[in-house]
Image (spheres, rainbow, N blue to C red):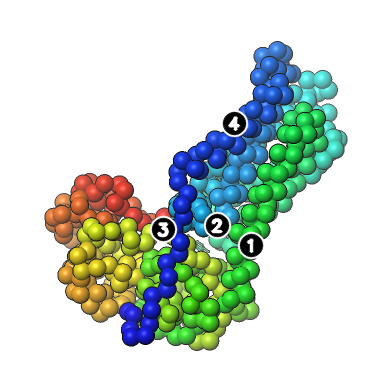
Amino acid sequence: MATLGVRKLRSPTMSRIRDTDVGATSGFITLIVIGIWLHHGGASFFGKSLASTLTSLDQITGLLCSEAGILGLILITRTPLLERRYGLDRLFNWHRLLGEAMALLLILHIAFSVWAWSIPGGFFDSVKSLTGGESYMALTAVGSAIILAITLSSLKWFRNKMSYEMWYFVHLTAYVGLAFSFSHQIVLGSDFSTDSLARWFWIGLHLAVVVWIIWSRWGRFFIAIARPFKVASVTHEAQGVTSVLLTGKNLGRHRALAGQFYLLRQVKAGRWWQANPFSLSSVPTSEGLRFTIKSRGEASDAMTKIRVGTRVIAEGPYGVCTPDLVGSKKAFLVAGGVGIGPIISYLEHLTFSSEPIVIYRAHSNNELAHLDEIEALVNARNGKLHTLIGPRASIKYADPFAPHILKKLAADISNRVVMIAGPESLVKAVQKGARGAGVPAENIHAERAWW
Ligand SMILES: Cc1cc2nc3c(=O)[nH]c(=O)nc-3n(C[C@H](O)[C@H](O)[C@H](O)COP(=O)(O)OP(=O)(O)OC[C@H]3O[C@@H](n4cnc5c(N)ncnc54)[C@H](O)[C@@H]3O)c2cc1C
């Protein structure tokens, strides 16, 4: 909590982008792509003969596949313009959907190309030409294989079999895959090799995205490396739960809001290559950024054992699930386990009129962290705290977040803003219960898992 002489950090600026801007930009790029295809006879080839129909389909699927790749890349530039409006979780989830669409279009593009090229010379000749016979096609074949491998690695079954870092580093090779595939678009086919206007538009679009990625994604990353934080204190909070306070000489320039999260990376041999997301567990102030961390696996365990003075690179802040969403309404807050971190930071930000009702779910009393702090914050805001302790099987109600139970805890829940932080299963259960209790979807907020 802020004490004398300690001031809250400034809030990040709001993004002015609107849904209509995003829709209009992606619609405009799609129209140009379809326009290029139509201009080069795509529609008139269609239906003339099998070969020309396949060529036409091959062209449009190739163009749309590249467009999906470009839009997917823009979504992960982490640009504040989009992140402050939609949140990293939503951008990553849209990126995944676009990635899947891109892979599907790529498979169709390959199938139509091989079929079309088989008509004059047979299947094997076609495969030979498309994997190396034609200029730049060897590079393209490798690029396509990389993109398809990345899509496969993102399917739940494969993802569950690899660590987050393994999946992430495999994902980084997408840049190589897309770069390798780019050349054949420019030199082969009728869309760009013979039309200089279309060619320069396409090259310009790709260059703009590359510059955007370098500036927004990697530029910010290198700024975070150049301005590391230092661990100022480490406090044991509960069984397997530690809070870590980060501070640094650039803190004053920093902008962050309660409820946001950072990707934290220890600057230490053997740890520097891992960055994990952790939420602020108190309003960010000139005293530092506090995170409450539970040992769940190797990286989070190392974070709970971090030493005072260790340098930490913090990328962020990210996230749009912030307490300003409550506005002038009353709040209903649900925390599961270490999800109590962001809930505390919301509470610190909320006013007396929010009368927060807080449900804190934990498996045992030993796992309750920051309990005194929450009680004090809730009482100071005329709110109420309910703890829900014990393994699922031992809890009195089959579904502790069923609509009638939520209504019992807050008769006016349908007029409250519900904010949830915790494991995905808890988030889903509360969302379902809150909707059943009459809370409109736009008043239910949670940070979604993206992996
Ligand atoms: C937005 C957000 C905020 C979070 N805030 C907190 C917090 O305040 N306190 C806290 O203790 N935990 C928080 N977590 C969870 C925390 O990030 C994971 O517990 C931690 O990354 C686990 O890593 P691990 O290597 O220790 O465990 P592992 O056993 O390797 O991972 C456990 C699970 O954590 C997820 N995970 C692992 N690494 C990453 C990564 N780099 N990015 C995204 N997900 C990953 C995966 O789903 C994985 O299956 C948050 C997660 C998210 C997405």
Specify the amino acid type for callout 3: Val
Mark 4 and mark 2 residues within 8 Å of each other at the beta carbon: no
Residue occupied by mark 1: 218
Q: Is residue 266 left or right of residue 450?
A: right
SS for tag 1? helix
Q: Residue at x 66, y 23 (%)?
A: 38
Question: How crowded is the residue under tag 3: few (<14 C-alpha within 10 Å), some, or many (20+)?
Answer: many
Q: Position of residue 79 (x, y in %)?
A: 55, 56
First of labels 4, 2 by sequence position: 4
The reply to whether the C-beta atoms of the residues labelled 3 and 1 are less than 8 Å apart is no
Q: Decide which of tag 4 and tag 1 comes sooner along the chain.
A: 4
Q: Amino acid at mark 4?
A: Leu
Q: Earlier in the sequence, mark 4 or mark 3?
A: 4
Which of the pair 246/210 is nearer the observer? Answer: 210
Q: CA distance from mark 4 to mark 2?
A: 25 Å
Residue 170 position (above or below residue 129): below
- Measured in 3D between alpha carbons, the distance from the residue under mark 1 to the one under mark 2, in whole angstroms, is 10 Å
Residue hosting label 4: 31
What residue is disc 2 on? 78
- The dot on residue 320 is 3
Q: Secondary structure at mark 2?
A: loop
Q: Is residue 235 above or below residue 354?
A: below
Q: Is any part of residue 56 visible from this angle? A: no
Figure check: 70 above or below 134: below
Residue 182 image position (x, y, % from top left): 74, 43
Helix, strand or loop at mark 3: loop
Which residue: 50% across, 74% down?
Answer: 253
